[in-house]
Image (tube, rainbow, N blue to C red):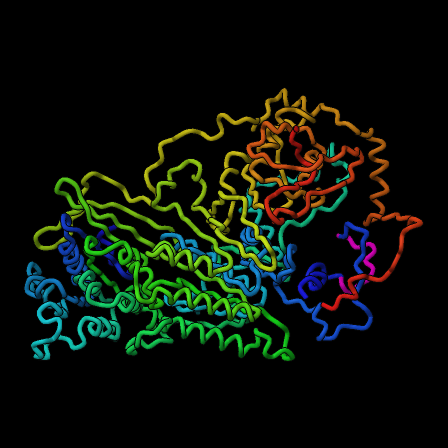
Amino acid sequence: MLESLLALGGLVLLRDSVEWEGRSLLKALIKKSALCGEQVHILGCEVSEEEFREGFDSNINSRLVYHDLFRDPLNWSETGETLPGGPLEALRALCRRTDPGPVTIALDSLSWLLLHLPCTTLCQTLHTLSHQDSCHGDSSPGEQVHVLGLLHEELHGPGPLGVLSSLAQTEVTLSGAMGQASAHILYRRPQQRLTHQTQWFSILPDFSLELQGGPPLEPQPYPDPRVPSMDPTTHLTFNLRLSKKEREAKDSLTLPFQFSSEKQQALLCPGLGQATSHIFYEPDAYDDLDQEDPDDDLDV
Amino acid sequence: MAAAASCSTSTRSTGSVVVAASRNSVTSFQRRGPRASGTDSGCSRLVSIAGTRPSVRNGQLLVSTGLPALDQLLGGGLAVGTVLLIEEDKYNIYSPLLFKYFLAEGIVTGHTLLVASAKEDPADILQELPAPLLDDNCKKECDEDICNHKTESNIKMKIAWRYQLLPKMEARPVSSSRFGHYYDVSKRIPQELIEASKWHGFFLPEKISSTLNLEPCSLNHGYIKLLQFIQNIIYEEGFDGSNPQKKQKNILRIGIQNLGSPLWGDDICWTENCDSNHSLTKFLYMLRGLLRSSLSACIITVPTHLIQNKAIIARVTNLSDTVVGLESFIGSEKETNPLYKDYHGLIHIRQIPQLNNLIYDVSDVKDLAFKLKRKLFTIEWVQDNYLRQERNIYPPGFSYLLKQKDSAWGEGSLQHSTFLMSFLAKGILVSFCVRCSENKEAAVGIQSCHTLAAAFASRLVRHSEPLEQTGSGRIRQAAGPRLWHDGPRQEAPGLLVIPP
């Protein structure tokens, strides 16, 4: 499922940590989408452009459109090279872009953006960015916008992490064991159940993705079958089932106040002729019969 | 007004004075028609709004939430003028479903809708509403999903033989004028129903231009815009009574999705102490003021699992009238618990409003779980899982079927007593109308039983004197719909006795 991450569309969150870094996975995914012919926009905030482009060969590098926010984030040099308005304006420019065709936008990194932008504006902009296809009328699968965000989860508290998880369509958490990296992928399809999968992988020097067996785990929508524990139907104080003898005893029980079947039929038969039952009422001496409805006096 | 409206919202025989031999009537009591002086529009007693009914407890006007099971749990339905708060589950899978049920119910009963969201376009939300099950296809659909349900009408009854000839009561709603409908979530609502309905949408990104330089204000700008929008709709369409002579009264159903998330511009999910700590609470307060003075009902979903400050969650809960929390099992350790193996999550009724009452009912049932089947969303008691013998569903509060084919129903036998006691101890059997019951044998059998030992009760409840055994099959006293009675269940008539 790792290789088809980009086919899923929407916001893909790559959560990494100090031990298991995620930039190489990000670059691997960028390379894959560049090879598929998509346009790739990169918003670079944490590393310089040279360092980011290192490792990609020239045809991929030519496809990457790099928006550099690392060198001069506050636009002090005023050369006009950097984007005016800072990162927010850069994101909004990406939202407004009108070129057709599928596009991948990589945010390197979301943590930097979280620390420099007000949170609500960032969330709203991310939402507009990842749902851009719906504004353009019909959205065929090829026209989707894929947003990849790299998030360093140790930098943020549970609040921002929770909010971004709820915004994201797919969440990939990187971890590993014994030198082998693994990705735990949580995918939320709209209107359907959540699926999650753990995939062991490694990144080759030319940033292609290699999936590995590792400690193997198949993709499954549910966790491992539970250890069968105590059956709740034992040690009940009542019977759930009847044995044959008990059933016979029950059926043969004569109920009190039971009429004979002839009398039953006689009582039932007059009921067949009429659809309603009758009320026989003989007023007492003290009864005050009044045909009016007492509720009529209420002025409600 | 509401109390007298009850006579018009129930059976449609108000016009006819005598309905002598109607096929379905099972009673000899005839309803008097309206007085010959006629009905003028000033006589508000006879005005009834489609899709509403007065509550049996206090006459408050109720609308259905779209899920009849949830209606029962909330005491009949959602009161007009109140807010239903849904606390979202962790991955927001099931709360949109409740939201859609509410809106779909509005479309089917002809109410006006107002849908507000910051995430999805309201037009898209309306396209995804579930299809209603109406009339003839209803029975077919319900029988597929609801598990087998053997009719006993052909069996000669031993105990309840007097009821053999009674017609079977219809258990499912069959027309759109009823209160509470069933929906099929695997199908979409037909397009013509959406087009025939009246709805207003509020999509936040369209209403707020993001490049606006917003000065800080005590209330979030998104919320201000939403409140103004709602107020305009209420005023223009006359839901607050501002145009009384104009037309038939109708209810406005408001649905607000994901309130409090950062997409609405609110910070409370982000940090614990933020500047706009009071935005959401102020918004809810003003919204409630708008609702109380108009004929409207509102559903709000809030991601409370994301809100960092617990005090805000408590304030939001207090400011809403009815609070329902959803907790899904995905990713939690409860997923592997055998008790919950058939369910997808728990549903917590955290708060029920205290309207026109001195006290309110906290639901005694604490373990409600939900399950999303392919077509239905069902709510059940968790303990039912191993107490029921066949996989029947016992929504609480229904007067109902007890399938105890496998239990020993000999009069006064110990197994009979213990089985029944375990059911009663869990609070399952409360209201019991023999006429409505599908298993008349069991119903009359239970009513005539009075030899239950208190030692088997897991809860000691004080009850009144047991029923006298009359032997003629006549119902002396049926345990009426008193599940939602005032205060703790003190006086359930005649079923149990505690030895002194």
Q: Quadrant of residue A88?
A: bottom left
Point 33% across, 67% down: residue: B276
Report whether B24 appears left or right of B423.
right
Residue B133 appears in view: no
Q: Is residue B386 above or below residue B280?
A: above
State the residue at coordinates (82%, 54%).
Answer: B21
Q: Which residues are magenta?
A: B14-24
x 38%, y 67%: residue: B279
Residue B98 spot, x, y in % from top left? 47, 57
Q: Is residue B430 left or right of residue A97?
A: right
Answer left or right for A83 relative to B210: left
Above or below B274: residue B141: above
Quadrant of the drawing holding the C terminus of chain A: bottom right
Prevailing SS of the magenta stretch = loop
Q: How many marks?
A: 0
Residue B23 percent coordinates (x, y): 77, 53
Q: Would you say B405 lies left or right of A116 here?
A: right
Name which quarter of the figure residue B33 lies in.
bottom right
Residue B399 point in image, percent of width and height: 64, 45
Residue in the image at 81% along x and 61% along y = A293
Instruction: Judge whether B64 appears above or below A39 on screen.
Output: above
Question: Taking B326 as reference, is B242 above or below it?
Answer: below
Instruction: Based on the picture, tell me whether residue B19 belongs to the magenta stretch.
Output: yes
- In the displayed image of the protein, which residue is found farthest to the top? A245
**Foreground residue, B350 or B17?**
B350
For the residue pair B250 and B107, the one nearer the viewer reads as B250
On the image, the x and y values in percent for residue A299 come to 74, 68
Can residue B493 be found in the magenta stretch? no
Residue at the right extreme, as displayed: A285
Residue B304 at least partly seen: yes
